[in-house]
Image (tube, helix red, strand yellow):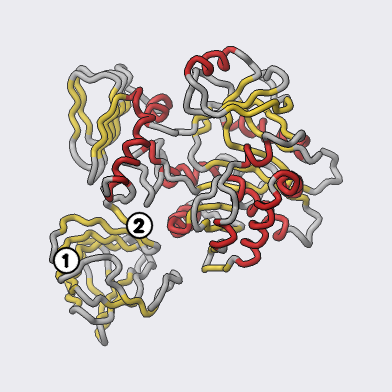
Amino acid sequence: MSSNIIYKIIPIILAGGTGSRLWPLSRKSFPKQFLNLLDDEYTMLQRTYKRVENLENISRPIVICNEEHRFIVGHQMKEINIEPLEILLEPEGRNTAPAITIAALKVLDIYKNTEIDPILLILSSDQQIKDINNFHSAIKSSIELSSKDNLIIFGVSPTYPSTGYGYIKSEKKLDLNEFNPSRVDKFIEKPDEKTAKYFVKDKKYSWNSGMFVFKAAAILNEIRNFAPETLKNCKKCLDKSKVDLDFLRLEEKSFKNCENTSIDIAVFEKTKKAFVIPLNCGWDDLGNWESLWKISEKDLNGNSVNGRVLVQDTKDSLILSEDKLVVGIDLENVVIVETKDAVLVANSKSSQGVKNIVSLMNEKGFSEAQNHKVVYRPWGSFLSIEERSTWQIKKIEVNPGASLSLQMHFHRSEHWVVVAGTAKVEIGDLEKIIGPNESVYVPLGTKHRLSNPTKYPLILIEIQSGSYLGEDDIKRFEDKYGREKD
């Protein structure tokens, strides 16, 4: 790229998936991109930005997520001291074409009065990349080509005949030791095993990584050519979108009018400007339990164990315990995942079928298919310990400096018992500070608020009693997080 061109790389992090193939750890209420799956200090979302933050000319990211995950995204970005350029809230998932179109429009708006020609780096928030140096080299190699209005996709060299990934066929054979681009010939959806075995042997085929590089203006030109209705609806959506605290809430009607399709199908399969650059960096999309087992640390018998787990005469298995002691005896090639409210036991080779089981659970009305026992809120989280028709016991954790809304319940009263930290409580006209082993009573129909005025976590036990215990029995009067007030 010539020295007189001013460019900026804008990471666009796609964080809207549900990750149902990693159930029961990943669920709709808290999917895999927000989990720490690799046993280190960062979640998958956080790792996605951390691995590119040191690139030259990199900017703060734009994150695109479902509106119900907005506070999770905001909190996890703050944990790594990142203030995104924007957090875009989708009213529902519509695949990557609408999301990328809106991101490109937004970026051009952000830089409209500058000399910067922004380049988008599209990243999925749920992938593993081991060799960061090679990943950076591939990105740098894509910048010169993308500056000439070409569209780049990264193709991963297949290491086995996967039937779970889409494939890219390039015009020329790809050299894994170089980052030379080749024009895209065509895209192939997830193949059968026989076809996948053929693809592995042919150096023209690579896995579709779902990561792209292109100028914001260049991708919009191609969307205008091949998906004009998507562009029209996305412009309307962005014009009608509203700022909500630290988020931009995308207008629902126009967004839902967008075709539910990927950028691959909408543009890359049709344009003459698509190039693939080989990516050899230890990539994995962590799409199922078998893929997680493959990249995880294992004992001498090939077992990946995490949590309170004890195994005997067991090999090549993944066993994870979130709560209870799990004991495995004389097992091979199994996946056992225990959470507070569900247990998965499966043959590791059948882990692709987990998605089908989640669909079946949804059909049969099992709430565990979508919802975790732990429920996350902008102020912290709560865990339902025990529940009956007229009473419930919860463990509530309030983040430092956070506060629940000023609220009232019509059908239940509450007792709060502090077990760790310090709480500020407001009950009617009463305001007081309570610490460990102290408790207060909140009568039915009384305005109340719970806050953590300290720099340390607050943990308390809440005992609810009443004729109805649903989360919708709430009337809010004030809320620092902008949630709906009645």
Q: Residue at x 79, y 41 (%)?
A: 149
Please indicate, yes or no, whether residue 438 appears anywhere in the rendered image: no
Q: Residue at x 35, y 67 (%)?
A: 454
Taking depth in this image into account, of 303 and 209 the one nearest to the observer is: 209
- Whole-percent x and y of residue 312? 19, 20
Cα–Cα gap, marks 2 and 1: 18 Å
Please indicate, yes or no, whether residue 244 appears anywhere in the rendered image: yes
Residue 247 left/right relative to 303 = right
**What SS does tag 1 mark?**
strand
- Whole-percent x and y of residue 6? 80, 48
Residue type indicated by callout 1: Ile
Residue at which label 2 appears: 376
Residue 357 left/right relative to 148 = left
Mark 1: few, some, or many residues within 10 Å (few <14, many ≥20)?
some
Query: Where's the C terminus, which quadrant?
Result: bottom left
Dot placed on the residue nearer the N-terminal end, 2 or 1: 2
Q: Residue at x 54, y 62 (%)?
A: 252
Query: Where's the N terminus, which quadrant?
Result: top right
Question: Which corner quadrant of the image does residue 182 belong to?
Answer: top right
- Whole-percent x and y of residue 218? 76, 45
Residue 483 left/right relative to 430 = right
Q: Residue at x 62, y 29 (%)?
A: 187
Mark 2: few, some, or many residues within 10 Å (few <14, many ≥20)?
some
Taking depth in this image into account, of 71 and 248 the one nearest to the observer is: 248
Given the current orientation, which residue lies at the most extreme bottom position?
Answer: 429
Residues marked 2 and 1 touching at CB (< 8 Å): no
Residue at which label 1 appears: 463
**What SS does tag 2 mark?**
strand
Q: How many numbered discs, if any?
A: 2
Residue type indicated by callout 2: Tyr
- Whole-percent x and y of residue 9? 69, 46
Question: Which of the numbered marks, if any, corresponds to residue 142?
Answer: none
